[in-house]
Image (cartoon, grey):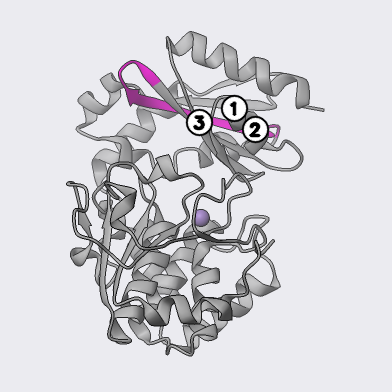
Amino acid sequence: MLTGIDLAELQPLIGRARRIMISTHVNPDGDGIGSGLGLYHALAGAGKAVVFHMQDPVPAYLRFLPGSDRIRHGQPNQSPQDLLITLDCGDYGRLGSAVGERRLYGHLLNIDHHVSNTAYGDSNVIRVDACAVGEIVFDLLQALNLPVDRDIATCLFTSLVTDTGSFRYSNTDVRALEVAAVLVRAGAEPWAVHAALYESVPPQQLRLAALALAGLRYFAEGRIGLIVVTEAMYAETGTGAEDTEGLIQFPRSVDTVEVAILLRPAGGGAWKASLRSKRHVDVAVIAAQFGGGGHQRAAGCQLNGSLDAAVEQLLRAIQPVLR
Ligand SMILES: [Mn+2]
């Protein structure tokens, strides 16, 4: 779905804008940051006054990306911008505090691939068939005739790698691999990106994984796998939320499991749930029941109350749709 807009139609909007701000969702991931930095470098190269501003800091595993040290975070943006471009962010609230007041922005361009996107922009490019927002940004740069140099290629390639699970998930289609090939030709190095992303784990992160794995539980004859991270585990291992990256792969990797759940503290006694499915359960629908969203095979939401209550609510939502 391309809601109303052909990418080439964005030419006048972007051409007119002198000051452009890029942002992505809270708890930013490789897609939000990779696609954002790719766009950042391209727009800066085109002579725009461009800033990349998000609520949270760049997670350590993404700090190898060229330009990641120039991303601003923390305080809300206060300077007026001609154009705000939001990437990989399904609803306006998920931008968190980064954007400040909406009246600061002459125009909001929302570029995303989440089926749950609320089309909150003045212009919305929502392509649910894109494996990553990096793929849409790649197409946008083509449409705008902006060159893809080595830095841009590395950032966009990282976006594709992280959102496709290193080209393994069901969103890995011919198009994803074709775009990846073009990016590699433009200078992205698959091994270097892989090593930076997945072979640079700090020891404490593995200790956290060991603690969480010890408590792995199954429900519904093994078709649901649950892994929980607690504040106590963070404290014992000296880790935090960003060290839970990749943990959900463990329950999902079990042969009987259709739906994998990762629960971690969300602050204020709430729990953040990450949901993954393998074949037929639409976890975006499950997450939406709790005010969250995402994709068919990967989604997230937040639940209030005790851990037991959070687990109970999720099981009650998932069990009826398991075959
Ligand atoms: Mn994404």
* Mark 2 neighbour class, 10 Å CA radius: few under 14, some 14 to 19, many 20 or more: many
Q: Provide the residue designation for mark 3.
A: 301
Q: Provide the residue designation for mark 1.
A: 225
Q: Quadrant of the N terminus?
A: bottom right
Residue type indicated by callout 3? Cys
> Where 303 sits versus 155, above or below?
above
Residue type indicated by callout 1? Gly
* Mark 3 neighbour class, 10 Å CA radius: few under 14, some 14 to 19, many 20 or more: many
Residue depth check, mark 3 versus mark 1: number of the one nearer the observer: 3
> Where 259 sits versus 315, above or below?
below
**What's the mark number on residue 259?**
2
Q: Relative to 280, is 88 on the left or the right? A: left
- Residue shown at 25%/44% (left/top)? 203
Residue depth check, mark 3 versus mark 2: number of the one nearer the observer: 3
Q: Does residue 93 belong to the magenta stretch?
A: no
Task: Measuring from the top left, give residue 149's x and y in whole percent.
Answer: 38, 87
Task: Measuring from the top left, give residue 276's x and y in whole percent.
Answer: 59, 39
Q: Is mark 3 within 8 Å of ligand 1?
A: no
Closer to us: 107 or 166:
107
Q: Secondary structure at mark 1?
A: strand
N-terminal-most mark, 2 or 1: 1
User: In this view of the protein, can residue 214 be seen by the observer?
Assistant: yes
- The segment highlighted magenta reads 256-270
Whether the residues at callouts 2 and 1 have beta carbons within 8 Å, the answer is yes
Q: Secondary structure at mark 2?
A: strand
Closer to us: 66 or 85:
85
Q: Is mark 2 within 8 Å of ligand 1?
A: no
Residue depth check, mark 2 versus mark 1: number of the one nearer the observer: 2
Q: Secondary structure at mark 3?
A: strand
